[in-house]
Image (tube, rainbow, N blue to C red):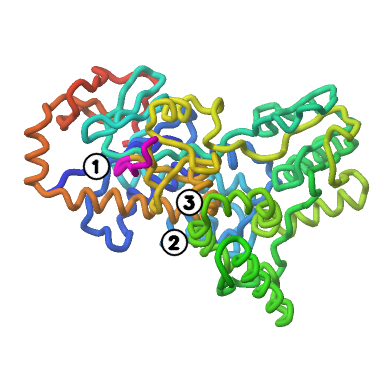
Amino acid sequence: MSRRPHVVVIGGGASGVLAAAALLDTGAEGLETAPRPFVTMIEPNEDLGLGLAYGRADEHHLLNSPAGRMGALARDPGGFVRWSVQDGGPALGADEFAPRRRYGRYLQDVARRLRDEHVGSLATVRARATLVRTQGTGVVVSLDTSWDLVADHVVLALGNPPTAGTALDGVAARDRVPDPWAPGALDAVAPGDRVTLVGTGLTAVDVATSLVRRHPTVQVTMVSRNGLLPETHPRTPAGTGDGIVPTGPGVAGILAGFSRSWHAARLDGTPWQRVVDGIRPQVNDLWASLDDAERRRFVARYSRRWEVLRHRMSPPVADALDALVDRGVVTVRAGRAADVPTDVVVDCTGPRPFASRGWSRLVDAMLDYGVVRPDALGIGLAVDDDGALLDDRGEASPRLWALGPARRGSQWESTAVPEIRSHASRIAARVRLAAADRSLETLRAERGRRPLATVVVPGVAPSRAAVPAGVATSPEPVPQVRGLD
């Protein structure tokens, strides 16, 4: 009595694969009778699931979350651990910190399993999306292959933008590296070089350990305004606390509630990490309770200290960094990068704001067309509670969705795998339940208003479907298309 929706997922990294897994999940509670969509993934690279985080990691780079939390589906967080038993490598314990490359292989296998288990429901297009716009009751996705795809829903799963590179301004150096994850970016470093890493977060930790492994005689200085390194996960699992109760409105009330729980844990001998992890499920609700002024206050004064506590190093990584510091190979300092004599300077300050211009042709075009708008802080794109994108009039789209870093300014906790898969599950529920609610009479009425046109879906045979008048469709596939069905 209802037709299958067509969902285009833009991005084939971790966020894109988690989105596709949620959309095609046949075991999702409450969605047993809801139509399973046809999913088209748009990704310029051949491999799905790797993206920036896992495709460019070195072998010694570890996840920052225990393996038991990293399954692809919200209803099955232990999926990664079970997969490790069949992977051919050592089986993982739920509390272990796995190599990021291995997790990338897991996501690749998730994508392959989606293809094999959902024949006729998944296709990929080797291309880049250049524009997304609504037209009639559908969405048109323009590609750099000169194709236009017609969909019922679109999920933006673009991952993190690159660094802005502006942290290098004013630093005198022989070589400047604006993006440490760009292919060959660290080739500029030679044995014996003095290397300055601007930033002291997780990116800087990864880059420092990689450089010393490559060139044991380098001298690395990690520098940031506060000189704060990420904290470390407990060596013995501490579990998750009960969260906090703010003592009043605004940031002050949240901080007071946090302080109360922190000191209570100290008196009880409870690891502080348990307190922080107990707040994690509350973060987006706490964020939603703040007005724009309070959010700006948090970002300006407290966000860095929260990130130090929240995004932690695994114990093996912390031990490796401590050893380098003890040997004098790595130095950590507070101050300005411009004050550190150096041969090579690397921007390790992390991704630029998602809503900033210049890093994505697609994001720029959607901002220009008013299809999306930045959140009030200019960090990400404005979304509603379920991740529906807001246009330049502030209206939530029933067809356009955001996943991952795009949601950061609207929902502070949105970039780690557990949150991404939870958000993907909510989007999937909205998409599939909306399709289930469309009766046969509604479909007939809709078809009476719109002419039928031939739609060529990449990777599958052409079919007859309702398409808004005037939308162009490609008459034949192009070489960049690779069907997974």
Hey, which quadrant is residue 342 in on the image?
A: top right
Between 103 and 325, the one lying in front of the other is: 325
Asked if the residues shown at circle 2 and circle 1 are in contact, with their CB atoms under 8 angstroms apart, the answer is: no
Q: Is residue 80 visible?
A: no
Dot 3 or dot 2, earlier in sequence = 2
Instruction: Please give the residue where the numbered disc 1 appears in the rendered image.
Output: 5
Residue 275 on image: x %, y %: 63, 70
Asked if the residues shown at circle 3 and circle 2 are in contact, with their CB atoms under 8 angstroms apart, the answer is: no
Instruction: Please give the residue where the numbered disc 2 appears in the rendered image.
Output: 76
Q: Is residue 54 left or right of residue 345?
A: left
Instruction: Please give the residue where the numbered disc 3 appears in the rendered image.
Output: 420
Residue 285 on image: x %, y %: 48, 61
Residue at horizontal 21 percent and vertical 31 percent from the top:
136
For label 3, the SS is helix
Q: Quadrant of the C terminus?
A: top left
Between 395 and 331, the one lying in front of the other is: 395
Question: Which label sits in the foreground, 2 or 1?
Answer: 1
